[in-house]
Every structure is written in C-alpha cells, then in structure tokens.
Amino acid sequence: MGWEWAADPGYWAARLGFQRGLAAIYLVAFLAAALQFNPLIGERGLLPVPRFTRRVPFRRAPSLFHWRYSDRLFATVAWAGVVISAALLLGLFDHTPVWVTMLAWLVPWLLYQSIVNIGQIWYSFGWESLLLEVGFLAIFLGPADTAPPVLVLWLLRWVLFRLEFGAGLIKMRGDACWRDLTCLYYHHETQPMPGPLSWYFHHLPKPLHKVEAAASHFTQLVVPFALFAPQPAASAAALLMILTQLWLVASGNFSWLNFLTITIAVSVVDIIPVQVPELARPPVWQHALVLGLTVLVAVLSYRPARNLVSRRQVMNTSFDRLHLVNTYGAFGSVTKVRHEIVIEATDDPAPDEDTVWREYEFKGKPGDPRRRPPQFAPYHLRLDWLMWFAALSTRYAESWLPGLAEKLLTADPDTLRLLRRDPFDGGRPTYLRARLYRYRFTTPRERRETGAWWVREPRGLVLPTTKLGPHGAVVAVD
C-alpha cells in the first residue's frame, strides 16, 4: 500500500469523525439558508438576488443562480442540501463505490457555493469560506470502507494551522489589549451575540481573564506548529485546540465556526482505540486526484501564506472565486463598549410626546434587558449578526436598514418570522424609528436586585421617525 494511503485505526476513526461532523454542519448551514433566505435575498427580500446577478457577472461570483433565479428554485436547492447532508450524516454513503461517495460530497459543496456567492453581506462571514474550503477537501476522502488518503488529512491540518495561527497573528498585530492581556475584560460583554453563560464569563476575576488571553495566544501562536509533529504530539495539539473551542462555544454564539474548527481538529486525532474493519485499497484514479488536489492547494496557498507573514494581514478573505484556500482570523480589535439598535414602532395616528413606542424583539441579539442571552450556535441568525455591525457603524446597514424599516411598516410576514416578537401581532404600525442604546451587563448586585441581565442607556437615533410614503417608500417625518 502506497505511503499516501493509511489503514491506521486512528486515521480511519479520524476521517469518520470528521465526515460526520462536517455533514452535521452542512445540515445546519442549509437549514439556515432555507429558513432565512426569503426576507433577506429572495425576489422581494432586502437585497434581492436578481438585482445582484444583474450587477455582478458569473466569473466574479460563480453560482447556478446566474442562469436562473426564483424563490422556488432557491428553496429547492437549500432543502436538497438539507437532504443530502442528512444522508451523509447518517452514513448512507459509507459503503458505496468511491465515485458515488465523492459525488455525494460534491453536491453539497456545489450547492452551498452557489448560495454563498450570491448571498452578499448576509454571507460575508469567515465561517462560510471555511465550510467551503473544508467541504472541498472532504470530496476526496472516500467512503468508510476504503483506506483514508493521508494527503487529504494533511491538507486539513494545513487549514487548521492557517485558521488558528492567522487568528493569533491578527490579535497580536491588532488591538493593544491583546498584548497586555486585557481584551477579555470587555469581549464577553461586547461580542456580537452573547450566550447564556456570557454574563458569568464576563464576571470572572480579571486575573483569570488574563489567563484566558494568554491561553488563547499559546493555543493559536505556538500549538499550531505541533500539528505537523509526529504522533502523539499532533493529537495533543488538536485536543488542546478542541478544548479551547469548547470554551468559546460555552462563552458565546459564533455560528458554526467553533464547531467546524473542532471537526477539523478531530481529523488530526490518532489516539482513539477502535476496531477497524477491513479496508479496501482506493482506486488508482482517486490516487491521481488526491495528488492533483495537493498540487492545487499548494499553488493556491501562496497568497494566504504570504498574507500570514504580512504586516498588513487581512482576515476572512478568499483569494479565489471558489473559496478553495482562504485566510482567516477574528477580533483583531475588540469593542470596549456595547451598543445595540432597538427598533420601535407605534400605531398612533400621529406621534407626540405621549406616544407609546413598542419594541420589536430579535431572536438572538440583546433587546429586553431582562431576557437572558439565548444559545443559538451553531445555527446562524444572519439579521441579528448584521444588527451588531450596524450598531458599530451605520455604513454596515446602508444597503438594508431602510428596507427593513419598510418591511416592518408593511408587516411583511417573511420578515416578521426573522424576529422573536412582533408587538403588533401582524398588524401594521403607522410610524417606526430605530434608537441606539449603550448596553452593559448588570453587576452581580444589580442582577440579584432587578433580575435583569443588562442595563441600557439611550444614546440617540439611528433611524429617525419614519412612515410609508404615498408610493410605499419609507419617508422621514419632519
């Protein structure tokens, strides 16, 4: 058996664990697309796909939707992705011929590629590119009853190295609080979408926050090099990364980023005692494809690798249209103060100083100070995440916030389904506005006395009082 194939029990179990985890993440990604696309990028969405495809050619954003788009077709693609992901998760292709298994993994990659490339700002996050890069490598791993191709497993280590090391470098080159170990004084409170335990993480003693930051630097800047060391050092490095990612899962909601990182790390672990079935030798043509894949990744890695050592390092960037080899990173700067946009409306015929404004409640992002931050990851609430960016700067919302106001004023049912609570129960408000608030976690004493998780203070208007004009457009009220 050639050196590039392994029948080692660890490699067999590692591949199987990786494939199951990746299939589960594909399932979540397609489900999120199916349930959220209509109000975001549908034909009558905030950023309609047909408008995008008229402006951006296929060569810049490869997608089957360039040939034809309809909401029904998108729904078909998304639900087909759910079905094929579920089949992969259940192991229905574990014992099919190699070409059938490869085709089964190719389908979700092609479908999700088509979604991401026309998803615009709603699909601009690093975990989208990471899923596509890793999903492409998964095509070449083969079924469970053949020996795993070790070269592909090493390419997964290369992804994990860039993911972790890039995140570590962007921190050290970015905010000074990473260098003095104080960033986590703020991060648990100001991260995009806190989770159920974030309040508790925020109130850890400050020396422990410094330990957190130092441990992050060690895991991201030192440990990744051990991925290329002999076993069991590589497995130990991967397990340490998994432990770190579980800490992040507990402390916040980062879509499927942490779960996918754990899944990639599982592909490195070679110390699990398992009973390995008799494995067939892969066909020669798969051998050739794996070698070709390795050469392709090596060539495409030049720009991402150069970016790693650049003083002008960028994060979460794709250097090719198919997201085959990318650069990653997060929180090069940490927000010290949390702001939130709260959307309010009224059905009064004419607002005055006595008007009661009622708030729309989002599913994940902070709103009602008495509501405990919920757990949504690995599911991705796209509108909630963009609302966090909009609170940082309105330039992130120029293309869609006025449209969101219009949808709420018309009580658009699809848009309302993105929210946790509609204060008008499907009725149309007459006026709407968006206010900016400063949010902070309550202190332990405030929490005991009030039962609230947040304290908030108004900071001004993001969107002035508006109403629907005679032609259905949103107009500001003088």
Image (tube, grey):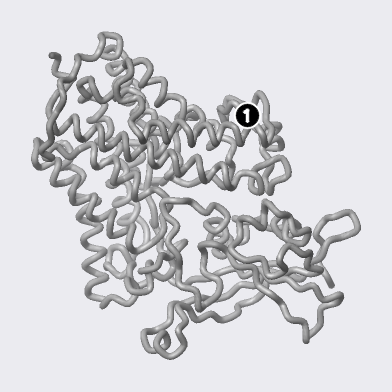
Residue at figure coordinates x 75%, y 68% from the top left? 432
Residue at figure coordinates x 46%, y 51% from the top left? 379
Q: Nearer the viewer, residue 222 or 243?
A: 243
Question: Is 205 situated above or below 94?
Answer: below
User: Residue 352, position in %: x, y?
Assistant: 81, 82
Find numbered disc 1 in the image and state the secondary structure of the residue it sits on: helix
User: Residue 370, position in %: x, y?
Assistant: 50, 78
The quarter of the picture where the C terminus appears is bottom right
User: Residue 224, position in %: x, y?
Assistant: 21, 44
Asked where in the image residue 264 lies, by quadrant, the reply is: top left
Residue at figure coordinates x 67%, y 54% from the top left? 415
Residue at image mark 1: 65
Q: Give the number of marks.
A: 1
Question: Is 352 situated above or below 431?
Answer: below
Seen as rendered, the residue at the extreme top is 284
Question: In the figure, is residue 205 to the left or right of 89?
Answer: left
Q: Name which residue type carries label 1.
A: Phe
Residue at figure coordinates x 45%, y 68% from the top left? 373
Question: In the figure, is residue 414 to the left or right of 242?
Answer: right
Question: In the figure, is residue 453 to the left or right of 400?
Answer: left
Question: Is 69 situated above or below 339?
Answer: above
Question: In the figure, is residue 173 to the left or right of 54?
Answer: left
Question: Is 476 situated above or below 143?
Answer: below
Near mark 1 (Cα within 10 A), the count class, few <14, some 14-19 or many ≥20, is some
Asked where in the image residue 48 lies, by quadrant, the reply is: top right
User: Residue 337, position in %: x, y?
Assistant: 47, 72
